[in-house]
Image: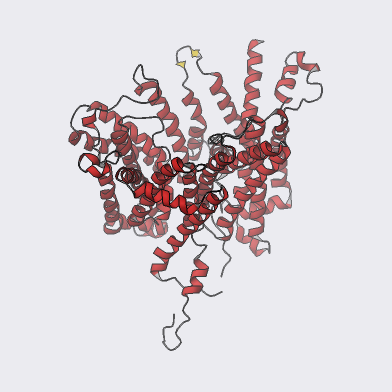
Amino acid sequence: MSARVPLPRWVDVALLPVLNVMLAFLIGGIVVMLVGQNPLDAVGIMIYGAFGYGSGFGYTLYYTTDFIFAGLAVSLAYQAGLFNIGPEGQAYVAGLGVILVALALNGLPWLVTVPAMIVAGGLFGAAWAFIPGYLQAKRGSHIVITTILFNFIAVSMMGYIISKHLKPDGVNSDESAPIDAISRVPQLNVFWDLFKHSPVNISFILALLALVGVYWLVWRTKFGFAMRVLGQNPTAARYAGISNSRMIMITMALAGAMAGMVAVNNVGGVQGRLILNFVSGAGFVGVAVAFMGKGHPFGVALSALLFGALYQGGQELAFSMPGITREMIVTIQALVILFTGAMGDMLRPPLERVFFKPPDNSSAEGG
Amino acid sequence: MHYYTDLILILDSTVRLAIPLILACLAGLYSERAGIVDIGLEGKLLGAAFGAAAMSAVTGSPWLGLLAGIGVALGMSGIHGLASINLKGNQIISGVALNFLAAGLTTFLGQSWFHRGGFTPQLSQSQRFGPISLPYADQVKDVPILGGLYSELISGHNILAYVAFIAVPVTAWVLFSTRFGLRLRAVGENPKALDTAGMSVTLLRYQALIITAVLVGIGGTYLSIAQSAGFNNNMSAGRGYIALAALIFAKWKPWPALATCLLFGFLDALQFRLQGIQFPVIGEVPVQAIQVLPYILTVVLLAGFIGRAVAPKAAGQPYTKER
């Protein structure tokens, strides 16, 4: 068999992922049909729920914020060839940093508390991701397994800390004391009436800045270059004088810090307290977002918005369509990971046939 | 005598809690020995548990339930095989996707089929796998020490539990004493050598995935229609991941896998027994401290502080014939 002809760039970066996502939704639609509902109606309700009115849109952006941070935590590590399945645990532990700082500074205006929460959340998240990074770099433990294990360790550790130490006397549910309203991350509806009853807050702006920041770091700095070399060819990186183990540890810490911002959005902003299992799967959505977005911040932004819309639209759907529950969204998420991640090259051979141009014999170079 | 009865009871629940772990761990062993990393064990356990409970609830037969459980696991293994063997995709991503797929579909389909918030209907005794009394269990119950051991610990489990225990020596024999086992181990270490010898890497890996699916399917079935009387949301509760951790801890070997699963099951059983008990000096041991032990032990092992866990060499890598 002859060597494969590369696809045109736009097919590779745009058409193929879009076709994969459409395939995922097509199968999702078939499942909806199987339970006796009209998938087109479902899509209509979801689009209205996600974008049709102010606070619905605000909820969409609130979910998007979480997914951007979690998606960046996965894609940043992936650029260095590391598969970080740990944003769920990293965000959870970061919640501890956020609440400790917020309760210590409680009562001060948000201009003081929010930067402190960002730093604390970032540091705690980074620390939780650093350990698997260290174990990978220095002890050769497989990062996929350790990040999964660290998600579970985080659940037990945080469960203990919240129920035994942070829970104030006389409170029944497992949660910390609340942060005063003036010290919380301010919601966007304070500045902009459109988002009236929705929890979207300044963390969303922070997420947009993080997207730009990650792009700049990965594609415009020497550090980012070293990171990508490590991801694509660790041997070449070592020969070029890059310390692979140092890069692995720094990259994982940065990824963990990104995941930590999920805690700023939720603990510092929306709930204003540390609640048991507050991350509730956002970290895992990050895995889907990163693969759908091909690890690029622009792709991460688009797929985070898509998942944000799915989550908010899915809530709306669960209200108005009998037989459809929120778990339909988890199913679609799974299909998206499957088709854009694991089976991402399924459509490549047919596309190669479509876009294959026979080598031009008249020119000396040929194909 | 009081402590002895207590001990027997703890060991008895150890066995019960270890069974799904043993089945899932052995399932993962076949797959990873053949070079296919299976993060999706968790999802397969969950999917199989749902399939078994749903089928048993509808037809009333636990045996059909078992078939359905294995069927679901086979279907999921098929997807995993297609993605990681034929399409040469990333096996970890495929496994992650399967876990989400099971978490989403079981609750979604459960809700739209049975309308009980994701639960399947409560199963009656005849729709489940009941305990089997081994011969003379009742007669020897009062014999000191050995009687309790036999009648409580060894007798009185269901058929799937005995299958799990039989699967361990069988796996050890298949893996280390048969031609198939040799090839299976080779395909996980050096697929190219097998290919050169004229054997099909694809076929061997699919065979491994089928065995994986059957074992984990039995494990899932055990969860929903033997241990419990029906399916409930996310009832696998991380057992697939624990099994994966146990597999690493056991260094991909069947007998150590049994020992590790029993140890993890014992920790699980202990966690229930120790709740609310005050110890001198340390006081009450927090449940979370025991919950977290299997994970911490595995991390410590992975970090190479107690021995070294070396995975099959070709695990996680799709095999491409040279072009």
Residue appearing at x 41%, y 43% in the figure: A316
Q: Quadrant of the N terminus of chain B?
A: top right
Residue B303, above or below B183? above
Q: Quadrant of residue A89?
A: top left
Residue B247, above or below B286? below
Q: Quadrant of residue A139?
A: top left
Could you tell whether B214 is left or right of A133 in the image? right
Using the image as rendered, state which of residue B235 and residue A79 is in the foreground.
B235
Could you tell whether B305 is left or right of B33 in the image? left
Could you tell whether A274 is left or right of B36 in the image? left
Where in the figure is residue B272, as x and y percent of width and height?
Answer: 55, 22
Where in the figure is residue B294, as x and y percent of width and height?
Answer: 52, 32
Residue B262, above or below B107? above
Where in the figure is residue B209, as x and y percent of width and height?
Answer: 64, 50
Using the image as rendered, state which of residue A240 and residue B26 is in the foreground.
B26
Q: Is residue B263 visible?
A: yes
Using the image as rendered, state which of residue B93 and residue B320 is in the foreground.
B93
